[in-house]
Image: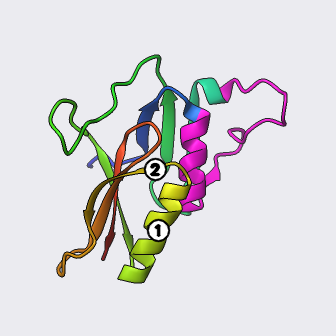
């Protein structure tokens, strides 16, 4: 028997904020009990560990850490160490996904949208983790 990937975990200095970024970007839902509390109430899960479910796909989890050096990729210094690859069906959807990510707080790291074989954007989430959107 071989192990199976249960979830992908991203370290972050703000678990709730990063979970909200990916929840909005990918249309995910919180694992029961991980939802944000009502306004003004304490958020003990948001300062520790949160999980977003992915309709049968691999869940994304967020682990609170005190410090996190931001990746400088594609520049040298701090490598990306892990990144998420995501796909869309066509170039129009690629641009729409890029615009949505930027509006949610991502930053553009690499633009290869004019590549005839594999158009893509590499972006960084608000904590600096790299994710790519490309046409499959």
Q: Is residue 56 magenta?
A: no
* Residue annotated with mark 1: 97
Specify whether residue 90 is in view. no
Viewer-side residue, 97 vs 42: 97
Packing grade of label 2 (10 A; few <14, some 14-19, many >=20) is: many
Q: Where is residue 71 in the image (x, y as percent from the top left)?
A: 29, 35
**Which quarter of the image is occupied by the C terminus?**
bottom left
Image disc number at residue 106: 2
| Residue 65, above or below 35 | above
| Residue 132, above or below 44 | below
86 sits left or right of 25 in the view: left
Secondary structure beneath disc 2?
loop
136 sits left or right of 100 in the view: left
Residue at the spot 54% in from the left edge and 40% down from the top edge: 18
Q: Is residue 22 magenta?
A: yes
Residue at the spot 47% in from the left edge and 60% down from the top edge: 57
| Residue 13, above or below 37 | above
- Magenta region, residue range: 16-45
Viewer-side residue, 119 vs 84: 119
Q: Where is residue 52 in the image (x, y as percent from the top left)?
A: 57, 48
């Amino acid at each position: 028997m071989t192990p199976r990937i249960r979830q992908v975990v991203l370290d972050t200095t703000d678990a709730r904020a990063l979970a909200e970024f990916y929840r909005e970007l990918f249309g995910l839902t919180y694992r029961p009990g991980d939802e944000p509390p009502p306004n003004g109430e304490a958020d003990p899960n948001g300062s520790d560990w949160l999980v977003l479910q992915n309709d049968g796909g691999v869940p994304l989890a967020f682990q609170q850490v005190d410090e996190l050096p931001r990746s400088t990729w594609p520049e040298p210094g701090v490598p990306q160490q892990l990144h998420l690859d995501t796909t869309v069906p066509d170039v129009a959807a690629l641009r729409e996904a890029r615009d949505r990510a930027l509006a949610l707080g991502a930053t553009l790291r690499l633009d290869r949208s004019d590549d005839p074989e594999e158009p893509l954007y590499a972006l960084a989430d608000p904590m600096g983790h790299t994710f790519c959107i490309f046409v499959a």
